Image (cartoon, coloured by chain):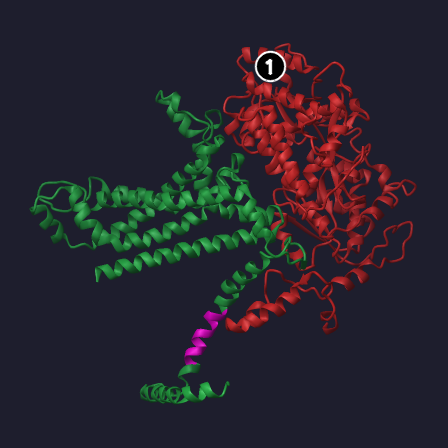
Chain colours: A red, B green
Amino acid sequence: MASSITGRTPSGTSSRRKFLQQIAAGGIAIGSGSVALSSCAIGGSDDDDDDSGDTAEAPEERSEENPLGIDPEEPVEIHIFDGGFGDAYATDIHQPIFSERWPDVEIDHNAAVDIAGELQTRFAAEDPPDFINNSGDGQMDPGQLVADGLLHDLTELFDAPSWDDPEVPVRDTLRAGTIESGTFDGKPYILNYTFTVFGIWYNKTLMDENGWSVPTTWDEMLDLCAEIADAGIAPWVYQGVTAPRYMNWPLLTMAAKLAGPEVLVAIDNLEEGAWGHEAVREAASAIRSLHEGGYFLDGVEGMEYRDAQGLWARGEAVFCPSGSWIENEEADAIAEDPSFELAVMPEPLLSEDSVMPLETIRATAGEPYIIPADANNPRTGMEYMRAMLSQEGARGFTEMVTSLTSVIGAADGVELAPGLSSAQEALNAAGDNIVNWFYPTWYKEMENPGIDQATGKLLRGDATVDEWVDECEAVAAEIREDDSLLKQNREL
Amino acid sequence: MTLTEPAGAAPAEETRRQRTQRTRSRSPMKRGMYPFILTFLLPPVGIYALYMLSPYIQAIYISFTDWSGLTTDFNVIGFDNYVELWNDDQIWTALRNNLILLVFAPVLTLLLGLFFASMLNVGGKRRGVAVQGVRGSSIYRIVYFFPQVLSVVIVGIVFKYVFAPESAGGILNSLFSFIGLDGLTQLWLGEPSYLIWIVLLVMTWSFVGFYVVLFSAAMQSIPKEIYEAALLDGSTRFTTFRRVTLPLVWDTVQVGWVYMAIQAMDGFAFVHIMLGVHGGVDGAGDVLGVAIYREAFSNNDFGYASSIGVLMLVLTMTIAVLFMRIMRRERVELA
């Protein structure tokens, strides 16, 4: 590979090899340098980065049966995040579907809890696997992966005919917003497979028992909170020290309902003053009023999120902000009391003349799957995604892990758990009035610790609404001025 | 020009070489001594260079780049990371916390360790016996060592629950309200200003046992006659400790201090487990070790993480050098 050494380094950048050359000179000074230094952190072979792309990218013959042009005999390496969903859905549902059509493709299945720990060095060595479920605590920063050009463009996948019906392309089988949620700079890089409904989750059993009705305006919410508190129950919990940012979800959704989704676009685009918008202030002061009224569960500010949610699921509190995964996450606590039933409600309206209707809800595709740009066999990785997005694959997933998927109609007729079915009802009621925001995916540090800490202060009463706005604005400004981040933009 | 100097220096050089050769020829291993020694030295030096020196040098180099940890290419960006470091409030918080640990953790741990060890070994009073520990000292000795046996992870998780709110199973708060001191209950882990002190407390708790054992061993090697003499002169227990015990275990205390200072500069495991990767509420319990981990593995910014690492290297070296200076002066005074 001698030829690849020369003229490889682009001007202005420094490659590992150049680094080696520089350090080798110093290596003599420290003794047995050159041997030692051939194995460094910035490592791996960079001999085949350009040409590997060429060979692997060259598609086989495309046909109706093989729209992505995969090599029917080349193995594919898959890494699944072994977290809340486990990895059985991949081995027991998706892989059989895939293997039925491609019996000769050997699937090298791997499951990991710490995805970055497992794969970060393989990216640095330009030898990543073909398919990754980049999720969990050890998630590799998606924005960074895109900025470094390490992800494979999925446009072809979304344009390909769907697994079940060759007449319908994959993109038309997906719920609105799915592809957008994984799009950076106009190109889709991430497949978000699950569909999560966010809202205020409440203890339906307690509400029914006491004859309390679901509040539709914030004033009603506060009245109800007073009533609940009088009954000796805490009205609200949130995710304590771990994730006060969960309270941002009702906050921003309420702001969007009051003044329209433009508020969220401004925040995503890091516009100056976006957090100081009148609607955002109003929503923040509504959320802060829960602290002022003493409506949070005693001591929740100092709790771990699982403890706080567990107390909610055991009937110590009525409302809890979360996504539709909570039923799964707190399954143990929920199972303790068979009469316990949970449901989701859309956030109450702050004012009678809100721009968006009460039914508006935040929902988004989640659980990211990616294909590395340097993968040996990216086409088969995409073919695997196509199999996942089949009706059978998506339905199997929903049945096994009780989560909705981004595939339209896949959950129809599936018997869902009570919480999830209420989420689906809310989703249907919302129709097109679905909101979402993207800055947490685009700029990971902005959401956590940035906004997270600001909102924590607001909830503890350590910050006024004005101080909260100032801090959020400062966090946004820091991201805006950080040249090392690739900036994203979106329009309504 | 180059010719003149070596010419002048040559004779002295020559004699020295001859002298060493003569000395060597007298030794039993005349020839083959250097190859022999080299065979023994090279592998460890090689391993040291490979696993210690090379990562240091690489880290320093990486700190001048914008490497994300995911690619093979990166840009050299000069001192940008260090400028960012200087302007990063979170790093100052972490640094302050490390310094708090550095000052208080050794002092607290060593004082407690000395106190317990002396009580266990020379603190007891019984007629007829000059030097002995307090009653039940053999049991205490074992009990004190328990925390040392537990892994740091377990200690961290246990103490998370000690300091949790009462409704979430918080042991400390439950204890306070059980004995009627409700006024003392606090949201320990929810209050930014408490965090680092809680870490300090837990760190001390988990290390004291080790020093009790270390100092006990040192104290047991002190001749009993010295204590008997002190006792005959009518010295109190405190005076005995100050005038006899402490000077005679001083060397061990110094070693202990260095070791504890190293622990205090780290603190990664305690903070990461008890407070999380962002250093708890408002990031107020952050330490440099956690900041490095966060920047590298959570934010994929290995360049910036390396610059924090270099900062830590400089700090640790400074402390080590200062300490060696102080130690050396003391040795001279004793001599």
Q: Is residue B22 magenta?
A: no
Q: Where's the C terminus of chain B, which quadrant?
A: bottom left
Residue beneath the point at 51% across and 85% down = B1
> Of helix, strand and loop, which one carries label 1?
helix
Task: Name the residue located 86 percent from the left edge and 54 percent from the top edge.
Answer: A69
| Amino acid carrying mark 1 in the image | Cys
Residue B27 lies, in percent from the top left, at 32, 86
Which residue was labeled with disc 1? A225
* Residue A10 visible in the shown view: yes
> Where on the picture, by quarter, is residue A36?
bottom right
Residue A29 sits above or below residue A148 on the image: below
Residue B5 screen position, x and y as percent: 45, 85
Residue A42 quadrant = bottom right
Residue A430 position by quadrant:
top right
Q: Is the magenta stretch mostly helix, strand or loop?
A: helix
Left or right of residue B17, residue A443 in this image: right
The front one of A77 and A97 is: A77
Q: Is residue B164 left or right of residue A73?
A: left
Confirm whether residue A399 shows in the render. Answer: no
Question: In the image, is residue B37 part of the stretch drawn in magenta?
Answer: yes
Residue A193 picture location, percent across and down: 75, 39
Provide the residue span drawn in magenta.
Answer: B36-46
Question: Residue B97 or B252: which is nearer the viewer?
Answer: B97
Q: State the count of labels.
A: 1
- Residue A249, compared with residue A26, is above or below; it is above
Binning the other alpha carbons within 10 Å of mark 1 as few (below 14), some (14 to 19) or many (20 upward) gives: many
Which residue lies at the image location 39% right of the left edge and 46% below the top edge? B102
Q: Is residue B120 left or right of residue B257?
A: left
On what subunit does the disc labeled 1 rest? A
Q: Work out whether residue A468 or residue A82 is closer to the camera in this orientation and state it.
A: A468
Q: Residue at x 18, y 54 (%)?
A: B222
Q: Where is residue B82 in the image (x, y as percent from the top left)?
A: 56, 52
